[in-house]
Image: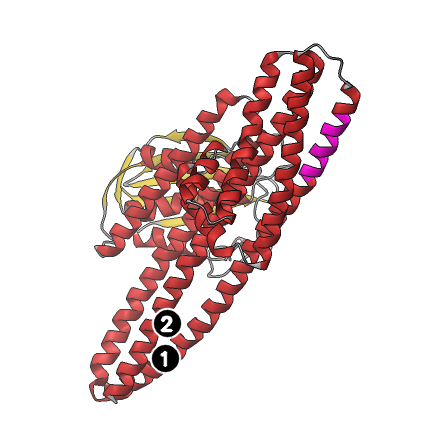
């Protein structure tokens, strides 16, 4: 029996290590794919800028335009140097220099070189290399046209402007098609990796589950004589597992709302044409990420120290400000309007639970916003009622149907409007409030908005 247990345990450990190795290389490959996507973007931008400056030079004869052209064309030429060096098996320092000349980030170079060396003979990447090589040939033609135009203009010879522009446009159009093909091949690479990683994970997981099941059966038989201990341990484990599940759900649920807000910020950033404003948006992103990281650390600290019910003095203003910062944009990029009317600023409760409550209720208000109205707002109030702090979170969203109001706090209840909903958000919100000896009620008017009223002891 002992040998069987050792054998099964060894299989589980080996399978777990296999998952780790699989994920390590899948992450490495996907990271390299991302680096090549950035590489393609730099290549494309350099080529298009070079084309634009060359056409300007042909018409304006301005030396500055030609210098810009030579600078821009050096980007795809640098990538060409790297490709030729890697194909020929030359010193990778030459490839590094080429990639750096092309404007690639130094941190991306190991992935770019590793991926090329590992997969240069793979069918999918051979096609990408061939596409890259064709693009380099066209870039060389573009460079030759630029050099010829420069010599003729510099020496005062007449040039066929229309003919040169036609050649340049033809090359540029072909390069665009080529670059799209290269991007598509990179996408195919990512999908292939995802497919095989999924299959590997599935097979290894089945092995782990099967071995774990056998081990569990053996251990249960061995522990049959100590049934009382097992029951007590199972009960303790069940309680711990339920508590961990709550924290894991709260953590994952709380992560989704800031991600939606970040998605909105990205949408704004993509549409923003004023470069001076970009830094403010990235600062908002950084702040949201830092706040979420701190919340994750708080949750992990709570789990490690088994302090789920421990109360401490909480600053409502700071918590509300943090939650608003993480949920300041709709996923579509529209900014959320928040109104804050706090009369009570401090109360004693579990800060992790309180953040979960605010995150869930505010993210719900965002998810069920009414975009048919000219303005979408969320109002947060706090005031004292006897010896309790009352917190109201009100919105002017779509509201809740009358026949659903009595069920919204039930486990797995879904309104049917948000298909991505798990039906657990308000259930765990209520549990978190009850863990703090509080209550929650709801007022809602269909089409007129919703108010959640939370009452907590001061």
**Residue at left 44%, top 39%?**
94
Using residue 375 as the reference point, say whether residue 353 is left or right of it.
left
| Of the pair 361 and 137, the residue shown nearer to us | 137
Measured as percent of width and height from the top left, residue 392 is found at 42, 39
Q: Where does the magenta region start and end?
A: 165-176
Q: If the image is split into quadrants, where does the N terminus sit?
A: bottom left
Secondary structure of residue under mark 2: helix
Which residue does the image show at 47% across and 29% down from the upper left?
Answer: 281
Circle 2 is placed at which residue position?
Answer: 15
Residue farthest top in this picture: 156
Label 2 close to label 1 by CB (< 8 Å) = yes
Of callouts 2 and 1, the N-terminal one: 2
Residue identifier under label 1: 211
127 vs 217: above or below: above
**Residue 46 locus on image (x, y percent):** 57, 30
Foreground residue among 401 and 264: 264
On screen, residue 310 versus residue 197, left or right, reads left
């Amino acid at each position: 029996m002992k040998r069987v247990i050792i054998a099964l345990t060894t299989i589980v450990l080996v399978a777990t290590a296999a998952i780790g190795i699989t994920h390590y290389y899948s992450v490495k490959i996907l990271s390299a794919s991302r680096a090549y996507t950035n590489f393609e973007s730099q290549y494309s931008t350099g080529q298009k800028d070079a084309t634009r400056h060359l056409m300007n030079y042909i018409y304006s004869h301005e030396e500055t335009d030609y210098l810009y052209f030579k600078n821009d064309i050096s980007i795809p030429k640098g990538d060409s140097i790297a490709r030729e060096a890697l194909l020929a098996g030359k010193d990778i320092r030459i490839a590094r220099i080429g990639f750096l000349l092309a404007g690639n980030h130094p941190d991306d170079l190991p992935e770019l070189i590793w991926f090329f060396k590992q997969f240069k003979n793979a069918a999918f990447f051979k096609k990408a290399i061939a596409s890259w090589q064709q693009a380099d040939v066209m870039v060389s033609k573009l460079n030759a046209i630029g050099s010829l135009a420069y010599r003729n203009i510099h020496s005062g010879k007449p040039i066929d402007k229309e003919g040169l522009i036609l050649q340049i446009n033809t090359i540029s159009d072909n390069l665009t098609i080529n670059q799209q093909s290269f991007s598509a091949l990179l996408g195919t690479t990512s999908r292939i990796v995802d497919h095989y990683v999924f299959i590997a994970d599935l097979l290894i997981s089945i092995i782990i589950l099967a071995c774990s099941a056998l081990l569990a059966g053996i251990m249960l038989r061995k522990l049959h004589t100590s049934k009382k201990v097992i029951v007590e341990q199972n009960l303790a484990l069940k309680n711990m597992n339920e508590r961990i599940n709550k924290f894991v759900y709260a953590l994952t649920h709380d992560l989704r709302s800031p991600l939606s807000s970040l998605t909105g910020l990205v949408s704004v950033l993509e549409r923003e044409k004023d470069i001076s404003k970009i830094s403010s948006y990235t600062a908002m992103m950084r702040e949201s990420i830092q706040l979420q990281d701190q919340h994750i650390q708080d949750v992990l600290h709570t789990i490690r120290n088994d302090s789920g019910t421990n109360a401490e003095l909480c600053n409502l203003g700071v918590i509300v400000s943090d939650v608003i910062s993480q949920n300041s944009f709709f996923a579509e990029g529209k900014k959320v309007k928040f109104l804050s009317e706090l009369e009570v600023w401090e109360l004693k409760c579990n800060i992790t639970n309180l953040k979960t409550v605010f995150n869930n209720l505010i993210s719900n208000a965002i998810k069920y916003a009414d975009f048919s109205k000219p303005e979408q707002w969320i109002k947060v109030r706090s005031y004292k009622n006897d010896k309790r702090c009352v917190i109201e979170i009100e919105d002017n969203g779509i509201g809740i149907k009358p026949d659903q109001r009595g069920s919204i706090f039930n486990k797995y209840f879904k309104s049917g409007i948000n298909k991505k909903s798990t039906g657990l958000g308000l259930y765990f919100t209520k549990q978190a409030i009850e863990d703090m000896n509080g209550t929650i009620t709801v007022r809602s008017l269909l089409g007129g908005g919703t108010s959640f009223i939370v009452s907590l002891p001061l």
